[in-house]
Image (cartoon, helix red, strand yellow):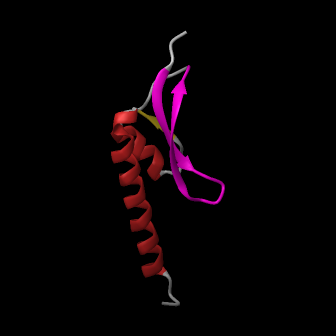
Amino acid sequence: MQWVEAARIGRRRDGKLYCEEVFMQYGKPLSAQEAIERLAHGRMAFVNRADAKAVFAKALEIEERERKNDRLDDPSN
């Protein structure tokens, strides 16, 4: 059986993003661009470990941008 080293990026129950190293038994990791698109839609993504740091940083950037836009859209501000 072939195990593929990967990293899983997603959200915990409390809503915080996380990234952890895993071994995939089935399937294959997504490209960095595909993973970023999935994460932008609130989905979990598996990526190559070499791409994990960059994808996670981009996901945090997207999250911060959305939070900033939510504050700007809030009429109570």
Quarter of the picture holding the N terminus: top right
Which residue is at 46% across, 26% downward?
A: 5
Q: Is residue 36 left or right of residue 22?
A: left
> Residue furthest toward the right?
13
Q: Is residue 24 magenta?
A: yes
- Residue at 46%, 44% (x, y): give it: 38
The residue shown at (45%, 52%) is: 40
Most distant residue in the bottom direction: 76
Query: Given the current orientation, which residue lies at the most extreme front position?
Result: 21
Where are the magenta residues, as a range? 4-25
| Position in image of residue 36 (x %, y %) | 39, 46
- Expressed as whole percent of the image width and height from the top left, the position of residue 48 reads 39, 32
- Does 51 sit above or below residue 58? above
What is the magenta segment's predominant secondary structure?
Answer: strand
User: Quick check: 34 above or below 23?
Assistant: below
Residue drawn 46% across and 31% down? 6
Please count the marks in the image: 0
Tell me if residue 23 is in the magenta stretch.
Answer: yes
